[in-house]
């Protein structure tokens, strides 16, 4: 799904460097996936593995189809997706604002940056129970946990990006009488974009993790809640079905970031396909 | 900046006893090191004159340009601009902004200082592109251009600013030899049209002789002017000038000057 959209994107690329090399790679990894699923199916059936331990891929599929057709999985997925997007959006806004302040003011940089780094030694997941206590089991606590987890990689990359401007380029602009705001607008912000997108890519995947972990701690809806509930009732097929949906959400968000990156940071040569796991 | 009118009407820029001293902190020893990048530099450049500055690395030639541009504060001395102090700078690297098309790169100065109306600026950019022979690349991005073409845009960008003084810091240093010669000739052609005042920093002695009216020879530690050599070869000049005995004589003179100054330290 992601490969198709990326190929369309390449039409607008000025230097067409690797136009069609992805297709065989995609077919290849798709083939490996099919083989793994087939072996999995065979082993489960051949050795009669109990369904409460490891369900066969076909069991997972039928549970997935059931859950989607009765609408229950879609409902929960929508709740989780909202948490992810709101938390991610909040993190992006906060991180960009902080990065701007830290890079524009030496005083703020010296005063705040060490503190921000220090707070990063706290595992943010450990904050989730506290946030549930403070904000309840509704969506707010999930959104905040997600934002907390996604914030730091965004901040670091944005700061790095805003500082990545070539000093000679700054001299060039200043030779035309550019003010600090000119330099920021014409040079530092565009130079920061590739770094910011690298941060967005990491953060979007972390956002999925954040929302699920927060739902584990205390929730009444969402995919994380479904995982816990089905674990309790030993409906392992449904747990796997949720994992499939989560991976689809993660992939879709990642592909969206990559797509935006190629559209917006069209000049950057570093357009390598990144495939990370959550 | 001070502007003097009257006796120095024909002076584009005059430096009087300019000093620039850096203090570098050396963290390991803890001892500060003092570098005299410019030591008692006095130089007067007439309007319309093409002056080259040659010398080994660290002789302060780039610092001199930065002091003129106001990017670096001088430690002591005076700088007077006879006419105006609007300067266009061409750097060793083209320093084009990769997210802007060639035309938009030419318009960067306009976007900063809005000196012209947008329509005038567009027309100027078009005229500049045809002068540089880059019309077909107007809407391309820098990444699609060769190094020579990029630097051509870099020169055009400085000229778009309509500078009274054009400063060039080893503008052809990053180019291969063939492109370099061609760019030198192109620069001379451009210069012959409106005879802007040019201060041209280079490593290459033949290049400096071929292009300039005068060559300023600088030596390092401390960075100072060793001698100013007049190049009284007739204009317009071309690459064929390089093989004439007069040309060779001037090149040799500068080379001897640089060698003796180097061995003296």
Image: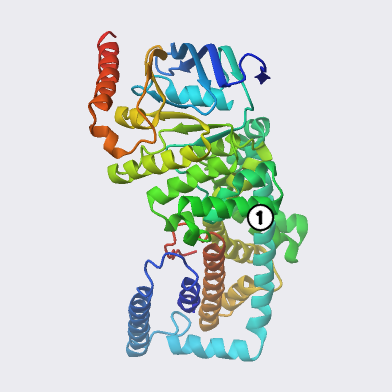
Quadrant holding the C terminus of chain B: top left
Seen at 44% across and 30% down, the residue is B200
Q: How many marks?
A: 1
Q: Secondary structure at mark 1?
A: helix
Q: Which residue is mark 1?
A: A91
Residue at 66% across, 55% down:
A91
Q: Nearer the viewer, residue A185 or B52?
A: B52
Where residue B143 sits, quadrant-wise, is bottom left
Q: Is residue A207 above or below residue B159?
A: below
Spot occupied by residue A233 in the image (x, y as percentages of width and height): 58, 80
Of B148 and B165, which appears nearest the observer?
B165
Name the residue located 50 percent from the left edge and 72 percent from the top edge.
A9
The quadrant where residue A43 appears: bottom left
Disc 1 crowd, CA 10 A, few/some/many (<14, 14-19, 20+): many
Left or right: B35 with respect to A89? left
| Residue B145 seen in this snapshot | yes
> Measured along the vertical axis of the image, is residue B176 above or below residue A139?
above
Vertical arrangement, residue B137 with respect to residue A72, above or below: above
Taking the image as drawn, is residue A194 in sight?
Answer: no
Going by the picture, which residue comes out furthest to the front? B234
Measured from the top left, where is residue B17 in percent x and y?
52, 9
Vertical order, A268 against B233 (above or below): below
Q: Given the image, what chain letter belongs to the residue carrying mark 1?
A: A
> In the image, residue B154 lies at what x, y percent?
49, 44
In this image, A125 relative to B174: left or right? right
Instruction: Write the residue at 38% across / 72% down.
Output: A19
Residue A91 relative to residue B126: left or right:
right
Q: Please name the colour scheme applied to the rendered image.
A: rainbow
Q: Position of residue B199 (x, y in %)?
A: 47, 28
The quadrant in which the N terminus of chain B is found is top right
> Viewer-proximal residue, A78 or B83?
B83
């Amino acid at each position: 799904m992601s490969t198709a959209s990326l190929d369309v994107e390449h039409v607008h690329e000025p230097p067409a460097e690797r136009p069609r090399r992805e297709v065989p790679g995609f077919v290849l990894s798709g083939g490996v996936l099919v083989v793994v699923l087939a072996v999995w199916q065979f082993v489960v059936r051949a050795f009669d593995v109990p369904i409460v331990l490891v369900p066969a891929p076909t069991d997972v599929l039928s549970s997935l189809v059931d859950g989607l057709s009765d609408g229950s999985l879609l409902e929960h997925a929508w709740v989780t997706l909202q948490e992810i997007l709101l938390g991610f959006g909040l993190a992006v806004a906060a991180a960009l604002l902080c990065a701007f302040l830290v890079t524009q003011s030496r005083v703020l940089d010296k005063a705040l940056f060490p503190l921000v780094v220090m707070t990063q030694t706290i595992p943010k997941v450990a904050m989730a129970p506290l946030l549930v206590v403070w904000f309840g089991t509704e969506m707010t606590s999930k959104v905040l946990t997600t934002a907390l987890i996604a914030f730091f990689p965004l901040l670091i990359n944005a700061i790095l990006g805003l500082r990545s401007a070539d000093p000679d380029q700054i001299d060039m602009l200043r030779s035309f009488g550019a003010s600090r705001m000119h330099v920021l607008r014409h040079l530092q912000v565009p130079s920061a974009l590739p770094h910011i997108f690298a941060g967005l890519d990491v953060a979007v995947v972390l956002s999925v993790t954040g929302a699920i972990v927060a739902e584990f701690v205390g929730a009444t809806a969402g995919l994380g809640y479904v995982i816990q509930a089905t674990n309790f009732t030993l409906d392992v097929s449904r747990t796997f079905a949720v994992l499939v949906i989560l991976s689809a959400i993660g992939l879709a968000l990642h592909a969206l970031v990559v797509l935006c990156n190629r559209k917006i940071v069209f000049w950057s040569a570093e357009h390598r396909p990144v495939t990370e796991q959550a | 900046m001070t502007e003097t009118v009257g006796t120095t009407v024909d002076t584009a820029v005059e430096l009087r006893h300019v000093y620039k001293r850096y203090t570098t902190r050396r963290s390991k020893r803890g001892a500060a090191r003092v570098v005299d990048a410019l030591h008692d530099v006095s130089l007067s450049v007439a309007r319309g004159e093409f002056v080259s500055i040659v010398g080994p690395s660290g002789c302060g030639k780039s610092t001199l340009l930065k002091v003129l541009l106001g990017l670096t504060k001088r430690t002591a001395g005076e700088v007077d601009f006879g006419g105006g102090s609007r300067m266009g700078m061409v750097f060793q690297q083209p320093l084009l902004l990769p997210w802007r098309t060639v035309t938009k790169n030419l318009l960067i100065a306009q976007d900063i200082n809005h000196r012209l109306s947008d329509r005038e600026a567009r027309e100027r950019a078009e005229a500049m592109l045809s002068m540089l022979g880059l019309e077909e690349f107007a809407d391309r991005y820098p990444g699609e251009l060769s190094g020579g073409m990029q630097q051509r845009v870099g020169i055009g960008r400085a000229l778009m600013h309509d500078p009274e003084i054009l400063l060039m810091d080893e503008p052809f240093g990053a180019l291969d030899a063939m492109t370099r010669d061609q760019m030198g000739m192109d620069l001379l052609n451009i210069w012959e049209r409106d005879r802007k005042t040019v201060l041209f920093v280079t490593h290459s002695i033949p290049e400096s002789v071929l292009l300039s009216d005068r060559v300023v020879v600088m030596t390092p530690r401390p960075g100072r002017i060793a001698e100013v050599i007049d190049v009284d070869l007739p204009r317009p000049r071309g690459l064929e000038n390089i093989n004439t005995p007069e040309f060779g004589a001037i090149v040799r003179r500068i080379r001897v000057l640089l060698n003796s100054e180097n061995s003296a330290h």
